[in-house]
Image: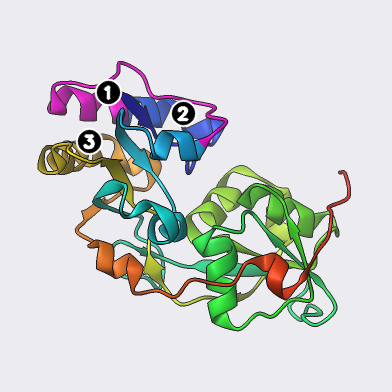
Protein backbone atom coordinates (compact mmCIF):
# COMPACT_ATOMS: atom_id res chain seq x y z
CA UNK A 1 0.00 0.00 0.00
CA UNK A 2 1.03 3.59 -0.64
CA UNK A 3 0.36 6.62 1.56
CA UNK A 4 1.68 9.93 0.29
CA UNK A 5 0.87 13.51 1.31
CA UNK A 6 3.10 15.67 -0.83
CA UNK A 7 0.98 18.65 -1.82
CA UNK A 8 2.31 20.80 1.04
CA UNK A 9 5.62 19.01 1.50
CA UNK A 10 7.71 21.61 3.31
CA UNK A 11 10.75 20.45 5.31
CA UNK A 12 9.37 22.25 8.35
CA UNK A 13 6.14 20.23 8.11
CA UNK A 14 7.47 16.71 7.61
CA UNK A 15 7.43 15.83 11.33
CA UNK A 16 3.83 17.06 11.55
CA UNK A 17 2.86 15.04 8.47
CA UNK A 18 4.48 11.95 9.96
CA UNK A 19 2.56 12.42 13.23
CA UNK A 20 -0.66 12.99 11.28
CA UNK A 21 -0.12 9.76 9.35
CA UNK A 22 0.81 7.76 12.46
CA UNK A 23 -2.45 8.78 14.17
CA UNK A 24 -4.44 8.09 11.00
CA UNK A 25 -2.86 4.68 10.50
CA UNK A 26 -3.39 3.70 14.14
CA UNK A 27 -7.09 4.58 13.93
CA UNK A 28 -7.45 2.84 10.55
CA UNK A 29 -5.67 -0.29 11.76
CA UNK A 30 -3.57 -0.88 8.65
CA UNK A 31 -1.45 0.83 6.04
CA UNK A 32 2.25 1.38 5.33
CA UNK A 33 4.37 2.26 8.33
CA UNK A 34 5.69 5.43 6.72
CA UNK A 35 4.57 8.02 4.22
CA UNK A 36 6.20 8.02 0.80
CA UNK A 37 8.36 11.13 0.49
CA UNK A 38 10.20 12.70 -2.44
CA UNK A 39 8.02 11.07 -5.09
CA UNK A 40 9.30 11.70 -8.60
CA UNK A 41 6.06 10.69 -10.33
CA UNK A 42 2.83 11.81 -8.67
CA UNK A 43 0.73 10.39 -11.48
CA UNK A 44 2.11 6.89 -10.93
CA UNK A 45 1.12 7.12 -7.26
CA UNK A 46 -2.32 8.60 -7.92
CA UNK A 47 -3.14 5.90 -10.48
CA UNK A 48 -1.62 2.97 -8.61
CA UNK A 49 -3.99 0.18 -7.48
CA UNK A 50 -1.88 0.12 -4.30
CA UNK A 51 -2.86 3.68 -3.35
CA UNK A 52 -4.34 3.93 0.12
CA UNK A 53 -4.16 7.68 0.62
CA UNK A 54 -2.89 10.68 -1.27
CA UNK A 55 -3.83 14.27 -1.96
CA UNK A 56 -4.20 15.60 -5.47
CA UNK A 57 -5.24 18.90 -7.04
CA UNK A 58 -8.76 19.63 -8.23
CA UNK A 59 -7.75 20.03 -11.88
CA UNK A 60 -5.97 16.65 -12.23
CA UNK A 61 -8.93 15.07 -10.43
CA UNK A 62 -11.56 16.40 -12.84
CA UNK A 63 -9.38 16.23 -15.96
CA UNK A 64 -8.10 12.67 -15.60
CA UNK A 65 -8.45 10.96 -12.23
CA UNK A 66 -12.13 11.00 -11.26
CA UNK A 67 -12.88 7.75 -13.11
CA UNK A 68 -9.79 6.00 -11.70
CA UNK A 69 -9.91 6.84 -7.97
CA UNK A 70 -12.39 7.34 -5.16
CA UNK A 71 -12.75 10.74 -3.51
CA UNK A 72 -12.41 10.55 0.27
CA UNK A 73 -13.02 14.18 1.18
CA UNK A 74 -11.45 17.61 1.29
CA UNK A 75 -9.39 19.17 4.09
CA UNK A 76 -10.52 22.44 5.59
CA UNK A 77 -7.62 24.88 5.98
CA UNK A 78 -9.73 27.70 7.39
CA UNK A 79 -8.62 30.14 4.71
CA UNK A 80 -9.80 33.75 4.72
CA UNK A 81 -12.67 34.45 2.34
CA UNK A 82 -13.35 30.75 1.76
CA UNK A 83 -16.00 28.39 3.04
CA UNK A 84 -14.98 25.15 4.78
CA UNK A 85 -13.16 22.92 2.31
CA UNK A 86 -12.50 25.71 -0.17
CA UNK A 87 -9.38 27.55 -1.22
CA UNK A 88 -8.43 30.17 -3.75
CA UNK A 89 -5.34 31.75 -5.25
CA UNK A 90 -3.53 34.99 -4.55
CA UNK A 91 -2.21 36.72 -7.64
CA UNK A 92 1.16 38.15 -6.72
CA UNK A 93 3.63 40.56 -8.28
CA UNK A 94 6.45 42.89 -7.26
CA UNK A 95 4.11 45.84 -7.63
CA UNK A 96 0.41 46.47 -7.09
CA UNK A 97 0.04 47.35 -10.79
CA UNK A 98 1.97 44.78 -12.84
CA UNK A 99 2.07 44.82 -16.63
CA UNK A 100 -0.60 42.22 -17.35
CA UNK A 101 -0.38 42.55 -21.12
CA UNK A 102 3.37 42.34 -21.68
CA UNK A 103 4.48 40.50 -18.56
CA UNK A 104 5.20 36.82 -17.94
CA UNK A 105 2.85 34.65 -15.87
CA UNK A 106 4.65 31.98 -13.84
CA UNK A 107 2.60 28.80 -13.36
CA UNK A 108 3.56 25.75 -11.39
CA UNK A 109 1.96 23.22 -13.76
CA UNK A 110 -0.44 23.27 -16.68
CA UNK A 111 -2.74 20.92 -14.72
CA UNK A 112 -2.88 23.10 -11.62
CA UNK A 113 -6.22 24.43 -10.42
CA UNK A 114 -4.74 27.22 -8.34
CA UNK A 115 -1.77 28.03 -10.56
CA UNK A 116 -3.42 27.95 -13.97
CA UNK A 117 -7.16 27.20 -14.03
CA UNK A 118 -7.99 29.77 -11.33
CA UNK A 119 -6.16 32.73 -12.93
CA UNK A 120 -7.58 31.79 -16.32
CA UNK A 121 -11.12 31.71 -14.90
CA UNK A 122 -10.32 35.00 -13.16
CA UNK A 123 -9.74 36.58 -16.56
CA UNK A 124 -5.95 36.64 -16.87
CA UNK A 125 -4.93 36.31 -20.52
CA UNK A 126 -1.12 36.32 -20.54
CA UNK A 127 0.88 36.52 -23.74
CA UNK A 128 3.81 34.68 -22.18
CA UNK A 129 3.89 31.86 -19.62
CA UNK A 130 6.74 30.13 -17.84
CA UNK A 131 6.22 26.75 -16.17
CA UNK A 132 8.22 26.49 -12.94
CA UNK A 133 7.26 23.10 -11.48
CA UNK A 134 6.05 24.39 -8.11
CA UNK A 135 4.19 27.22 -6.39
CA UNK A 136 7.20 28.28 -4.34
CA UNK A 137 9.29 28.31 -7.51
CA UNK A 138 6.67 30.50 -9.22
CA UNK A 139 6.72 32.96 -6.33
CA UNK A 140 10.52 32.96 -6.36
CA UNK A 141 10.50 33.66 -10.11
CA UNK A 142 8.41 36.76 -9.43
CA UNK A 143 10.61 37.80 -6.52
CA UNK A 144 13.74 37.44 -8.70
CA UNK A 145 12.17 39.41 -11.55
CA UNK A 146 12.10 36.45 -13.93
CA UNK A 147 8.29 36.57 -14.08
CA UNK A 148 5.82 39.42 -13.70
CA UNK A 149 3.11 37.65 -11.74
CA UNK A 150 1.94 34.27 -10.51
CA UNK A 151 -1.15 32.69 -8.96
CA UNK A 152 -0.27 30.92 -5.72
CA UNK A 153 -2.71 28.72 -3.83
CA UNK A 154 -3.77 30.39 -0.60
CA UNK A 155 -2.44 27.68 1.71
CA UNK A 156 0.96 27.74 0.01
CA UNK A 157 0.92 31.53 0.34
CA UNK A 158 0.30 31.11 4.07
CA UNK A 159 3.34 28.83 4.28
CA UNK A 160 5.49 31.20 2.23
CA UNK A 161 4.59 34.02 4.61
CA UNK A 162 5.38 31.79 7.58
CA UNK A 163 8.63 30.21 6.47
CA UNK A 164 10.35 32.63 4.07
CA UNK A 165 11.57 36.21 4.25
CA UNK A 166 11.81 36.95 0.54
CA UNK A 167 8.10 36.36 -0.19
CA UNK A 168 7.04 39.09 2.23
CA UNK A 169 8.20 41.75 -0.23
CA UNK A 170 5.73 40.51 -2.86
CA UNK A 171 2.38 42.23 -3.37
CA UNK A 172 -1.02 40.52 -3.47
CA UNK A 173 -2.70 42.09 -6.50
CA UNK A 174 -5.98 40.16 -6.51
CA UNK A 175 -7.58 36.96 -5.25
CA UNK A 176 -9.46 34.42 -7.35
CA UNK A 177 -12.88 32.99 -6.54
CA UNK A 178 -12.91 30.07 -4.07
CA UNK A 179 -13.15 26.51 -5.38
CA UNK A 180 -13.00 23.10 -3.66
CA UNK A 181 -9.58 22.56 -2.08
CA UNK A 182 -7.13 19.74 -2.79
CA UNK A 183 -8.98 16.43 -2.33
CA UNK A 184 -7.86 13.29 -0.56
CA UNK A 185 -8.11 10.27 -2.86
CA UNK A 186 -7.73 6.50 -2.67
CA UNK A 187 -7.72 3.63 -5.16
CA UNK A 188 -11.01 2.10 -6.19
CA UNK A 189 -12.47 -0.54 -3.85
CA UNK A 190 -10.93 0.92 -0.68
CA UNK A 191 -13.04 1.52 2.44
CA UNK A 192 -13.71 5.24 1.98
CA UNK A 193 -15.83 5.55 5.12
CA UNK A 194 -13.05 4.10 7.29
CA UNK A 195 -10.54 6.48 5.73
CA UNK A 196 -12.84 9.44 6.39
CA UNK A 197 -13.12 8.53 10.07
CA UNK A 198 -9.37 8.00 10.38
CA UNK A 199 -8.60 11.38 8.78
CA UNK A 200 -11.07 13.13 11.08
CA UNK A 201 -9.41 11.46 14.05
CA UNK A 202 -5.91 12.48 12.93
CA UNK A 203 -7.07 16.03 12.22
CA UNK A 204 -8.44 16.36 15.75
CA UNK A 205 -5.10 15.33 17.26
CA UNK A 206 -2.45 16.65 14.88
CA UNK A 207 -4.30 18.78 12.32
CA UNK A 208 -3.46 22.17 13.83
CA UNK A 209 0.24 21.85 12.97
CA UNK A 210 -0.79 21.43 9.32
CA UNK A 211 -3.55 24.07 9.47
CA UNK A 212 -6.12 21.30 8.95
CA UNK A 213 -9.34 21.98 10.84
CA UNK A 214 -11.15 18.87 9.64
CA UNK A 215 -12.36 17.07 6.55
CA UNK A 216 -15.33 18.26 4.49
CA UNK A 217 -17.64 16.11 2.39
CA UNK A 218 -17.20 17.12 -1.24
CA UNK A 219 -18.55 15.12 -4.16
CA UNK A 220 -16.93 14.49 -7.50
CA UNK A 221 -19.59 16.74 -9.02
CA UNK A 222 -18.34 19.65 -6.90
CA UNK A 223 -15.04 19.38 -8.77
CA UNK A 224 -16.42 18.40 -12.16
CA UNK A 225 -18.68 21.46 -12.23
CA UNK A 226 -15.65 23.67 -12.84
CA UNK A 227 -14.58 24.23 -16.46
CA UNK A 228 -11.33 22.90 -17.84
CA UNK A 229 -8.91 25.64 -18.89
CA UNK A 230 -7.13 25.54 -22.25
CA UNK A 231 -3.60 24.22 -22.43
CA UNK A 232 -1.17 27.08 -21.79
CA UNK A 233 0.68 26.39 -25.04
CA UNK A 234 -2.55 26.96 -26.96
CA UNK A 235 -3.06 30.50 -25.67
CA UNK A 236 0.38 31.90 -24.93
CA UNK A 237 4.07 31.65 -25.74
CA UNK A 238 5.90 29.32 -23.37
CA UNK A 239 9.17 30.85 -22.24
CA UNK A 240 12.00 29.67 -20.02
CA UNK A 241 12.90 30.94 -16.57
CA UNK A 242 16.33 32.40 -15.95
CA UNK A 243 18.49 30.69 -13.37
CA UNK A 244 18.59 32.20 -9.87
Q: Please, what secondary structure does the residue beneath circle 3 have?
A: helix
Q: Residue at x 41, y 59 (%)?
A: 58
Left or right of 180, for residue 191: left
Q: Which residue matches tag 1? A: 22
Asked whether the beta carbons under mark 3 and mark 1 sit within 8 Å of each other, the answer is no
Q: Please, what secondary structure does the residue beneath circle 2 have?
A: helix
Q: Main secondary structure of the magenta part?
A: loop
Q: Which residues are magenta?
A: 21-41
Name the disc covering residue 202, or none.
Answer: 3
**How many dots with numbers?**
3
| Vertical position of residue 63 compared to residue 52: above or below | below
- What distance separates the C-alpha of mark 3 from that of mark 1? 8 Å
Is residue 171 something that shows in the picture? Answer: no
Q: How is the image coloured?
A: rainbow
User: Residue 61 appears at what percent x and percent y?
Assistant: 39, 55
Asked whether the beta carbons under mark 2 and mark 1 sit within 8 Å of each other, the answer is no
- Asked whether 146 or 185 is in front, the reply is 185
**Residue neighbourhood size for the residue with mark 2, other residues' Cα within 10 Å, grouped as few (<14), some (14–19), many (≥20):** some
> For residue 236, which quarter of the picture?
bottom right
Asked whether the beta carbons under mark 3 and mark 2 sit within 8 Å of each other, the answer is no
Q: Which residue matches tag 2? A: 14
**Residue neighbourhood size for the residue with mark 3, other residues' Cα within 10 Å, grouped as few (<14), some (14–19), many (≥20):** many
Pointer 3 or 1: first along the chain: 1
> Where does the C terminus fall, quadrant-wise?
top right
Which residue is at the far top?
A: 33
User: Residue 13 appears at what percent x and percent y?
Assistant: 47, 33
Q: Residue at x 69, y 71 (%)?
A: 234
- What distance separates the C-alpha of mark 3 from that of mark 2? 15 Å
User: Residue 120 appears at what percent x and percent y?
Assistant: 59, 76
User: Residue 215 appears at what percent x and percent y?
Assistant: 23, 51
Pointer 2 or 1: first along the chain: 2
Amino acid sequence: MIAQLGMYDWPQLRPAHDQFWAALRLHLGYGPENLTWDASDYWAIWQSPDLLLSQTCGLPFRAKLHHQVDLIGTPDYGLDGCQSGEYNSVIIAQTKQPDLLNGVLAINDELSQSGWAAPWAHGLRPNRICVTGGHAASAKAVAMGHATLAAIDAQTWTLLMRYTDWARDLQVVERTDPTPALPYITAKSRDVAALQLAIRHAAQIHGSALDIRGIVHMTADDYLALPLPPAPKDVAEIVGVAAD
